[in-house]
Amino acid sequence: MNSDPKLERIAKGNALALCATGTWTASFAPVLERMVADAEKLAGTPQSIFIDVSEIAKLDTFGAWLIERLRRSLTKGPVEAQIAGLSANYSSLVDEVRRVRATAVVDSSPITITGMLEQIGRSVAGVAGTVAGLIDMLGAVLAAGFRILIHPRSFRLTSTVHHMEQVCWRAVPIIVLITFLIGCIIAQQGIFHFRRFGADIFVVDMLGVLVLREIGVLLVAIMVAGRSGSAYTAELGSMKMREEIDALRTMGFDPIEVLVLPRMMALVLALPILAFLGAMAALYGGGLVAWLYGGVEPEAFLLRLRDAISIDHFIVGIVKAPVMAAVIGIVACVEGLAVQGSAESLGQHTTASVVKGIFFVIVMDGIFAIFFASIGM
């Protein structure tokens, strides 16, 4: 029997029947598309239209969708096209395809002042919603921490240590490498420009202040936001998609206490350690370049560094670290718990977690700079 698909038009009294025969599968896609497109031109006829599929030998999802598309196209006003002769083998497939909603028409209206103002309003409302979500998560974490203080046995030490290993110990190589290279670059560029004025030694002052106060902790926080913040969002988002978080609530566990608090504690403890290691690596890289490229002996470098910096510079950098860690953790957990049940949503929220985390880290660094300048540090 010939399996080529066909779609014949047969008049039956006041009705018109479209008889589909043969194989309606994706392998005959070009032929099927042309036949359905020709049949869709019948839309608007006053006749009742039946799509007879009793002679279809084989049907897959592609063919079922074409039949459903044809039915929707021929349904105009009071005239509704009907599918007849559907076998029990394919009825569930056609019913499933029928549940798919038609794609919404994209609004192609011209841009107006009102529309622009509406978009600005929606963006501002979105920012306000983001800030409200962060404040809500901060309150939930503080409440969970207060409950842990009252009942210390409920603290999940094993989970915290596990996340400390992931966030801190496993991040040491990449943090040290990147900060070492940044220190080398800062020293090389500083020597290159200071040499014009015969002030090579002042690169030590610049390197010490920049690394300990700003670059060290800021660079480490940005790397942690991209590495650990995205991982937290992906982990919580995957658990949300698999309904594991709902299962925790059903069993009487608080997801904030079980999932979020250990991750937050690990970040708050890990970032100061990483910031310290990163600052030391950057100073070592800068000193190495100053020695090999600038001719500054290690003894002279250390003596100048001791005179250029004070304990205040170190304190400023270390104080920033736990606050930035808390911001990164809150943003990551909020985005992770906001994931819906699709891979696309997981990807969008993971990207948003990294972008928002870096943004808020830089904002916090600016706030700290103003604060410490106002108190004379």
Image: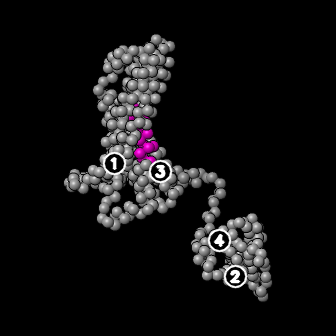
Residue 124, position in %: x, y?
Answer: 48, 50
| Circle on res. 60 | 4
Q: Is residue 131 above or below residue 27?
A: above
Residue 263, position in %: x, y?
Answer: 35, 49
Residue 75, position in %: x, y?
Answer: 68, 76
Q: Which comes before the other along the chain, label 3 or label 1?
A: 1
Q: Amino acid at mark 3?
A: Thr
Range covered by the magenta-colored residues? 216-230
State which quadrant residue 307 falls in.
Answer: top left
Secondary element at image label 2: strand
Q: Which residue lies under the disc numbered 2?
A: 54
Q: Is residue 4 above or below residue 159?
A: below
Find out whether the residues at labels 2 and 1 contact each other: C-beta distance under 8 Å: no
Find out whether the residues at labels 3 and 4 contact each other: C-beta distance under 8 Å: no
Q: Which comes before the other along the chain, label 4 or label 1?
A: 4
Q: CA distance from mark 3 to mark 4?
A: 35 Å
Residue at the spot 68% in from the left edge and 71% down from the top edge: 63
Q: Residue furthest left?
A: 150
Q: Is residue 229 magenta?
A: yes
Q: Amino acid at mark 1?
A: His
Q: CA distance from mark 4 to mark 1?
A: 48 Å
